[in-house]
Image: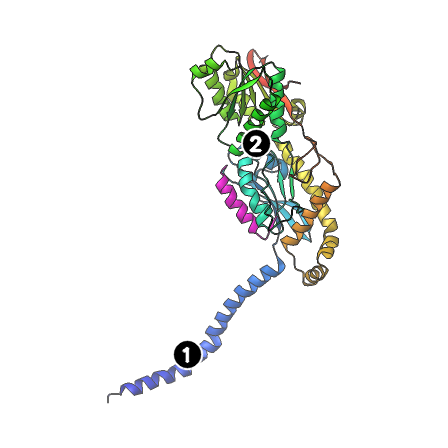
Amino acid sequence: MKRPASDIKLFTNLLGRLLLAPLGKFVLIPILSAFIGIIIVSRITDWWIGADSYYIYLVGDHRNNPAIAEIFEGFRDKPCDSGDILILDEGINNVPIKAKCVDDQDDPIKARQISDNLAARKDTLMVIGHVKSTQTKAALPAYLQQATPPVPVILTMETNPQLIPVKKSDQESSDDYSPLFRLWPTDDEQAARAAQFAAGNKNSVLWVVEDEHNPVYSKYLALKFVEWVQKKNEQAMKVALWSSNMSVPSAETLKKLDIDFVFFAGDWSNALILINQIKRLLPNQKITLFLSDAAAGEELLDNGKDDLIQLNVHLTFPLKRKLYSETSDNGFKFIGKDARSIVNWLIDETRQHYATESRERASFKYWAMLLLNRHEIEDARSVLNARMEKAVRDDKVFEGKLNRYQFIRDNGKNILAQWHIWKVEKVKKDGQYQYRFVDAE
């Protein structure tokens, strides 16, 4: 006998109610609820407690630039490829502090992307970087303006004094403190030091060359050198030519100008290219070549070899060569060690004053957070920023392995830093001629 369709449908519905409904009620729904609950609870717990560790991020092209790798290793006491390292187990508000390296690939666009990410993270306590002025200028707006409160930054070898982003009057007061310490002196003084050397050396026809690889650094430094010469208005000395390393004038032009002094604002690799060009364009002319601090490093001597013959090569650096040599063969590691010693002091100060300053800032929030065992990176950064500002107000002097440091409010400048002049000297060792840096003063 054939069953009508309505009976089959009725039987199916009845079976569903008897079998499937209990299955969904007692098995599927609890499993689904548990799964959703785990996701929600984990998110809430993660938000409630905060980051497991606070991080000091060391940002720069450490994979390709040996100097940057040395600075970061000095800070961490281990190379970047060894992974994260523990700075302090019982850190701020009982949260451990670690250090992590990040590679900005020597690219200002990449540097800005990284800074946007770090400024938004819930574990960013501080940044050391980006070491080069061009990348640092691209990154600082995120650290100092986007993040609330700002992310404290320590600059190691950046020398451009105009890296801090201009404050927006509708968002920030002129009294707002930008938490920034810079270890190296600025290019205003470096340019003056180089120009004074040219004047004292009786050079008269000057050629200024800027390296396009790090334009924020080189353009400003070249400009300040030219401005210093023009302001002095010395009749016996004038800038006859200003170019970039990518557009070197012809030999005919250089010979007509009778160039006797070249100021190069750039790194050692492009300095060697310029040296080769000068030797071929002006083979018999006595030239004084003055290099900026970015060219300082054993790579200039190791790779230069015979290229340095017949040129009078000088350069500026924030340390005397004797002190630099006494610390190590490559003193960049000690720049990192000085940065680490300053950070250690700041962290210790922040730990000691965390409870007091947090209560003063928001008493109810502090006690509520303490009761609920909750911590936020914003609270740690607020106290750290306050300790940096107090160090500036109190004229705190930090004693380092390479230098002494005392920072001012406006741009974080180290007012104790000075520029010194080195020269490249030819010496005979084991029957062969070698080159070395020595103090020229």
> Is 8 rendered above or below residue 435?
below
Secondary element type, mark 1: helix
x, y (%) of residue 252? Answer: 43, 14
x, y (%) of residue 106? Answer: 50, 36
> Is 9 rendered above or below residue 399?
below
Q: What is the span of residues highlighted in magenta in the rendered image? A: 106-125
How packed mark 1 is, by other alpha carbons closer than 10 Å (few <14, some 14-19, many 20 or more), is few
Instruction: Decide whether residue 65 is among the magenta residues.
Output: no
Q: Is residue 288 visible?
A: yes
Predominant secondary structure, magenta span: helix
Secondary element type, mark 2: helix
Task: Provide the residue designation for mark 1.
Answer: 20
Horizontal side, residue 90 vs residue 7: left or right: right
Q: Quadrant of the N terminus?
A: bottom left
x, y (%) of residue 223? Answer: 55, 28
Mark in front: 1 vs 2: 2
**Residue 67: which numbered mark, if any?**
2
Whether tag 1 and tag 2 are in contact, CB under 8 A, the answer is no
As measured in the structure, the alpha-carbon distance from the residue carrying label 1 to the one carrying label 2 is: 69 Å
Q: Tell me which label, 1 or 2, sits earlier in the chain.
A: 1
